[in-house]
Amino acid sequence: MSTKITISFRSIISDFLFWGLCLSVILNMFDNTRYYIFQLIFIGIYLFILGINGSLKILVDFIRKHLLLVLAFCAWTILALFQSSIYSSLRILSFFALIFMGYLIVVKNQLQGLVISLRRIGILLFISVLYGLVAFFLKTNPFMFLSERFETYTRSFTRITSVFVHPIPCATFFIIALIIILTIGKNKIYTTIASIICLAGIIYTFSRSAWASALIVMLIIYYPKIKKLCVAHKLKKNTLIFLIIAFLGICLLAIIYRNALAETINLVVQRLFKEDLSSDMSFTWRISSIGIIANQSINSGPVGFLFGHGVESGSQFLTRMHFGSLFSYNVGAVDNSYISVLYDLGIVGLGFIIALIIVTAVLMFRFQNRYCKIISYIMIVLLIMAFFYEELYWCNSGYLFFSFAGITIALWDRRKIL
């Protein structure tokens, strides 16, 4: 009996992915521009927990297999010292450390251990969905006064932010919660209820990019099942009964809460169609920033074009520009991770992201391993949502992006046994 408790306690304590996400979410609530220093300290602690000697052996193996990637990070780290400061170098180092830690936990814990971690993350994110919905409808957020940054983003209550400060990162995490529930959940009834709650959370973030991302990922997840049903031309009796009950339950809820449903539909329609693209400030700014930064990247010198200008240099470049009265809000953000990477880390950095897209797609469509597919779905969401905000530079979503990039690389290295 005591042995089981010890093993369980140890597995919880050594769950880097879960506790790292908790730390990143907490750090993100505060206006801490040097959060990556805390992440590096956290990673150092976990290297001791997971075993220094074993971790170093895996690091050597990682460097041997991915030498070009390691050399690129070395170049970015050194250039950051000359282009900006030691803090930028440390930030680059934290990106690499997170990638390696993602790689390490797959090698050490195997896929099943990773899924246990995902279950914990799923529970945590589902709680954040519930909290976000309650805060949104009650128009109150107890965490609001933790920092000026958090209050600035959450005081309007027009969109759900939950504990993630901003509605777009919030929507990203809500979609990941939905994926984990749909793919790992065992009880159909609980899974259905939890999925509906997550969908409601995604809708009330009023993030159009998140709506599109959620739809794409759900189509990817359910397309094989729908295709199989169409080929079979029949449903199992239990499945048919469940679908009928679920449909009737949704209809009943729609009738009971018809006023709230009508208001929600109206808000969604307004969000989608109230403006044409030419007058949509968000769309116009994203297109403008893409053009400006892409043009500036192409016209950079050889070093700038290959390895970029340093972390967040794209945002700093836009901040220094004068747009007059064209935009009514702060324009100090590129709002597109791919363009940010192109300017900040050069064509080499963008090449890494493109390679990651290709590897993720191959793992998802070519291999039938269930756990591999779950990781791929999550990575797809992160890659899609990265197109709509600077995901890599947010403390919470950036943590998840680089960690899952490392996990994806590990799965690719181990593809022969998937």
Image (cartoon, rainbow, N blue to C red):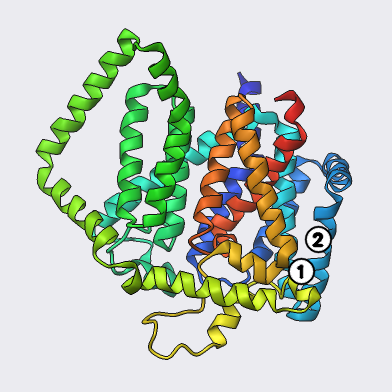
Residue at 83% x, 63% y: name it: 74
Residue type at numbered disc 2: Ala
User: Measured along the vertical axis of the image, is residue 40 above or below residue 8?
Assistant: below
Residue 135 is left or right of residue 372, and the answer is: left
The x and y percentages for residue 131 are 34, 50
Q: Residue at x 65, y 65 (%)?
A: 341
Q: Where's the N terminus, which quadrant?
A: top right
Label 1: element kind:
helix
* Horizontal side of residue 229 vs 37, given as left or right: left
Residue 24: x, y in percent?
Answer: 56, 57
In the image: residue 43, left or right of residue 386: right
Q: How far apart are marks 1 and 2 (CA)?
A: 8 Å
Tag 1–tag 2 contact (CB < 8 Å): yes
How many residues crowd mark 2 within 10 Å: few (<14), some (14–19), many (20+)?
some
Could you say which quadrant of the image residue 366 lies in? Answer: top right
Q: Can residue 145 be seen in this view?
A: no
In front of the other: 203 or 388: 388
Give the mark nearer the N terminus: 1 vs 2: 2
Q: Which residue lies furthest to the top in this view?
A: 237
Neighbour tally class for label 1: few under 14, some 14-19, many 20 plus, Cα within 10 Å: many
Label number found at residue 72: 2
- Which residue is at a point 61% across and 50% down the rendered structure image? 20
Hey, what amino acid is under mark 1? Answer: Phe
Note whether residue 188 is visible. yes
Q: Quadrant of residue 142?
A: bottom left
Q: Residue 44: x and y, percent?
A: 75, 54
Specify the label residue 307 is tagged with.
1
Helix, strand or loop under label 2: helix
Rendered-image quadrant of the C terminus: top right
